[in-house]
């Protein structure tokens, strides 16, 4: 009896986990397709049929892809029952299953996804297309938050003398002003770090990195971990 209860509990936990992953995939219909696709987010869409064996085989991987990007506001991973919504499938030239298409921001035409179908293949593709920096587990990589256009200015800032730093700081401010979207948010972190660097000394960045790492070693939410990793990555450019 005890063994049965253990297996029942494990089975329930597994079903809960799979359900949680599946919830990250946006289910498209004829009512929400226009709202979710081709708007202000990049969208990867799987056109599938419930009876399709290849679709069933892809499902666990596709659910992990969706879970990996669930915290990204600029990314949607979705699917559409093309057998049920035949008009939409025909509109996008779907003739086999599964068919995968990527829709960049503001693009309702979409483009065929011709890459591999492993988790890392999908993750690399979305990172490249959407400017994100996630790994297969949904964690931010070491490049997340880094703004290439500010890198040279940070090097100049770190190398500058005390008086010269203020002039370089002004350059960083101007560089941040022209940024848009998520890079604009990251740019504000650059400015805050640069200001603290001037106010608290050159060892500020290293001390703050160590403090954030101690926080990351604790049990924290995924959203809070993202926040700390972004700051750590940007701080590292000042060391």
Image (cartoon, grey):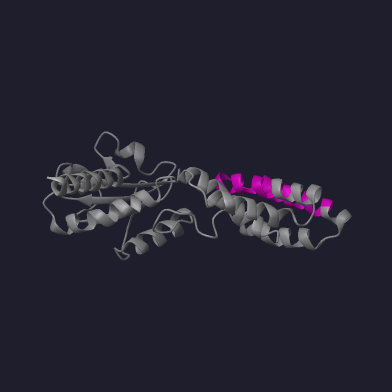
Q: Per the image, is 187 magenta?
A: yes
Q: Residue at x 64, y 55 (%)?
A: 210
Point out the residue furthest to the top here.
31
Nearer to me, 168 or 24: 24
Residue 17 position in % (x across, y down): 28, 46
From what the image shows, is residue 160 above or below residue 2?
below
Is most of the magenta stretch helix, strand or loop? helix
Residue 73 position in % (x across, y down): 45, 43
Residue 97 seen from this side: no
Q: Quadrant of residue 113?
A: bottom left
Q: Is residue 51 left or right of residue 176?
A: left
Span shown in magenta: 166-191
Nearer to me, 120 or 179: 120
Q: Is residue 188 left or right of residue 181?
A: right
Q: Is residue 149 left or right of residue 126?
A: right
Q: Residue at x 21, y 56 (%)?
A: 98
Nearer to me, 172 or 113: 172
- Image mark count: 0
Q: Quadrant of the C terminus?
A: bottom right
Point out the residue furthest to the right here.
163
Q: Quadrant of residue 206?
A: bottom right
Residue 135 seen from this side: yes
Residue 196 position in % (x across, y down): 75, 47
Residue 188 position in % (x across, y down): 66, 45
Q: Quadrant of the N terminus?
A: top left
Q: Is residue 21 left or right of residue 202?
A: left
Q: Per the image, is 94 magenta?
A: no
């Amino acid at each position: 009896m005890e063994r049965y209860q253990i297996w029942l509990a494990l089975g329930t936990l597994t079903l809960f986990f799979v359900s949680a992953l599946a919830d990250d995939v946006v289910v498209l219909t004829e009512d929400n397709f226009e709202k979710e696709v081709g708007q202000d987010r990049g969208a990867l869409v799987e056109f599938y049929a419930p009876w399709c064996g290849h679709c069933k085989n892809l499902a666990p991987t596709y659910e992990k892809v969706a879970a990996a990007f669930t915290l990204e506001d600029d990314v949607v991973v979705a699917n559409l029952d093309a057998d049920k919504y035949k008009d939409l499938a025909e509109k996008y030239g779907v003739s086999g299953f599964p068919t995968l298409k990527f829709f960049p921001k503001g693009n309702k035409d979409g483009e065929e996804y011709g890459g591999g179908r492993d988790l890392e293949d999908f993750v690399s593709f979305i990172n490249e297309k959407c400017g994100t920096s996630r790994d297969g587990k949904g964690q931010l990589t070491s490049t997340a938050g880094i703004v290439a256009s500010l890198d040279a200015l940070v090097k100049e800032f770190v190398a500058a003398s005390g008086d010269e730093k203020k002039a370089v700081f002004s350059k960083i401010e101007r560089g941040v002003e022209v940024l848009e979207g998520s890079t604009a948010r990251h740019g504000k972190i650059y400015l805050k770090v640069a200001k603290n660097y001037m106010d608290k000394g050159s060892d500020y960045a290293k001390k703050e990195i160590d403090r954030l790492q101690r926080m990351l070693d604790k049990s924290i939410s995924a959203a809070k971990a993202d926040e700390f990793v972004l700051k750590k990555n940007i701080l590292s450019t000042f060391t």
